[in-house]
Image: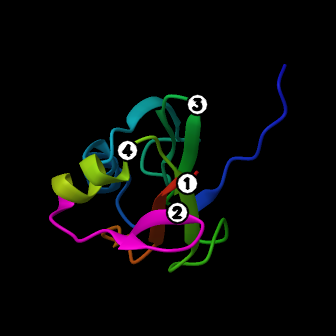
């Protein structure tokens, strides 16, 4: 097993969040609910990138910032209709999901 880290983002409605993250190229891998009517916990992935989306109130703070390194930030920027900013370390954009979580998405400069 490889070691990695998976950020947990708080969401109000996991189905709505999964639909939004699909625009970023993420697809759901699995979901868990302790009992019918309980909060949903979902893993989504884009290649090797993974995020957990949780409806559980205590799992994370709304408005969290996550940095995603991607191969082609220009394609992501085009999909969301936002301009790309040039920083010394990367070409970047910043997005907010429907729950206010911030995603800084960048392609490192060489």
Q: Secondary structure under badge 2?
A: strand
User: Residue 75 lies in magenta, yes or no?
Assistant: no
Question: Residue 17, image x and y in percent?
Answer: 33, 55
Which residue in the structure is indicated by mark 4?
72
Q: Secondary structure under badge 3?
A: loop
Q: Secondary structure under badge 1?
A: strand
Q: Quadrant of the N terminus?
A: top right
Question: Residue 66, image x and y in percent?
Answer: 57, 65
Which residue in the structure is indicated by mark 2?
90
Looking at the image, is mark 1 or mark 2 earlier in the sequence? 2
3 vs 4, front mark: 4
Looking at the image, is mark 3 or mark 1 earlier in the sequence? 3
Question: Residue 109, image x and y in percent?
Answer: 54, 56
Q: Nearer the viewer, residue 74 or 1?
A: 74
Which residue in the structure is indicated by mark 1?
108
2 vs 3, front mark: 2
Residue sitting at x 21%, y 69%: 82
Question: Residue 104, image x and y in percent?
Answer: 48, 67
Task: Name the mark on residue 48.
Answer: 3
Q: Nearer the viewer, residue 106 or 66?
A: 106
Give the crowd class for mark 1: few <14, some 14-19, many >=20 residues within 10 Å.
Answer: some
Q: Name the residue furthest top.
A: 1
The answer to which image quadrant residue 71 occupies is top left
Question: Disc 3 versus disc 4: distance between alpha carbons?
Answer: 15 Å
3 vs 1, front mark: 1
Residue sitting at x 56%, y 47%: 51
Q: Name the residue furthest front.
A: 110
In the visual, does 104 lie left or right of 21? Answer: right
- Examine the rendering and report whether any part of residue 110 can be seen: yes
Question: Disc 1 versus disc 4: distance between alpha carbons?
Answer: 10 Å
């Amino acid at each position: 097993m490889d070691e990695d880290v998976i950020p947990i983002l708080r969401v109000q409605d996991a189905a709505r969040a999964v639909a939004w993250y699909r625009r970023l190229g993420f697809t759901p891998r699995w979901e868990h609910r302790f009992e019918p009517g309980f909060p949903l916990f979902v893993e989504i992935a884009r290649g090797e990138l993974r995020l957990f989306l949780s409806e559980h109130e205590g799992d994370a703070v709304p408005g969290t910032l996550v940095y995603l390194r991607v191969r082609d930030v220009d394609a992501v920027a085009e999909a969301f209709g936002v301009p790309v900013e040039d920083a010394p370390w990367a070409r970047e954009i910043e997005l907010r999901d429907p729950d206010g979580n911030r995603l800084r998405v960048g392609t490192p400069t060489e």
